[in-house]
Amino acid sequence: MLNKKNIVLLSIFIISVGALLRYYQINFENYWFDEINDFWVTDPSISLDATFSRRESIGDVSPYLWESLLKMYFKIFGYTPEIGRYVPLFFGILSIPFIGVLSYQVKKDNSFLLAIILISINIYLIKYSQETRVYSLVFFLATINLIFYYKIISLDLAHFKKIYIFLLFIGSSILNFSAHPFLLIIFFSQVACSIYTFFILKNKKPSIFFIYSIYINNIYFHKL
């Protein structure tokens, strides 16, 4: 039976292994086509109008959050392809402990260790953490969003004692939509889950969340 200290040490070890696997030979391969496009679009020496023109020229219609982060990063740390890959590396590593948090929320036992092991050694997540593309950010934001969603449906929010959870969830949802359109799948899944829980299972815990999420996201989409 693992005690608390050993669990913490083991968690740190697993996360460290995952970080090393993502860092190892991070610039072994040259940029591929999509990475070149992102690198070209996020040139910090050009204006915002020029950036959008370049996006349009390559047919990029995705939200602008990733390019904004990358452009600011290049402006601070230098505009080189090798440096660019440390952005997805950062989000790739940061996702590991947050997956552990999400797993522990679902089942409060040591099974979260298995979750972070599987995430740490996942070859696809390792690969995405070494590419100057949006997918590590997408995975990280989706994980954060699910953490807040699970908190909402697990709490009695009848008296708005946890309103800050709503605000954090809404903020993470907006960031999700600003990162990649595929993350809308998560939003609509959450809406479907809320409808099923409220109307079929007659559990009123997520009902306020459902109203808030629809209202806020309608505001967001009308601004687009």
Image: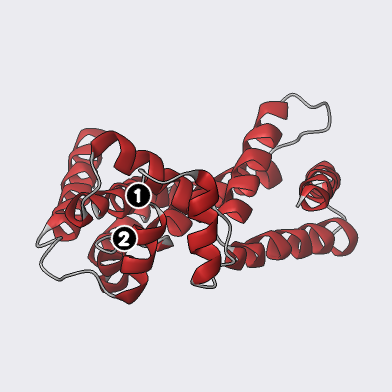
Q: Which residue is found at the position 66% from the left and 44% from the top?
A: 154
Q: Are marks 1 and 2 in contact (CB under 8 Å)?
A: no
Whole-percent x, y for residue 79 in the image? 25, 47
Q: Secondary structure at mark 2?
A: loop
| Local secondary structure at mark 1 | helix
Of 140 and 83, the residue lying toward us? 83
Report which residue position mark 2 lands on.
132
Relative vertical location of residue 130 with respect to residue 99 in this rendering, above or below: below
The picture places residue 185, in percent across and down from the top left corner, at: 65, 67
* Residue named by callout 1: 91
In the picture, measured across the screen, residue 146 lies left or right of residue 27, that is right
Residue type for callout 1: Phe
Q: At x 30% / y 49%, what residue is drawn?
A: 87
Quadrant for residue 33, please give it. Answer: bottom left
- x 13%, y 62%: residue: 27
- Is 215 displayed left or right of 1 in the figure? right
Residue 75: quadrant of the picture: top left
**Rendered location of residue 37, percent (x, y):** 38, 67
Q: Is residue 2 left or right of residue 140?
A: left
- The amino acid on which the numbered mark 2 sits, given as a three-letter code, is Thr
Left or right: where 91 falls relative to 159: left
Callout 1 crowding tier (Cα within 10 Å): few <14, some 14–19, many ≥20: some
| Disc 1 from disc 2: Cα separation | 11 Å
- Is residue 157 or residue 97 the one in the foreground? 97
Above or below residue 208? Residue 131 is below
Residue 107 visible? The answer is no
Please identify the quarter of the rendering in which residue 123 is found: bottom left
* Nearer to me, 61 or 87: 61
- Closer to the eye: label 1 or 2: 2
Residue 97 x %, y %: 34, 46
User: In terms of sequence position, does the residue under pointer 1 or pointer 2 come before the other?
Assistant: 1
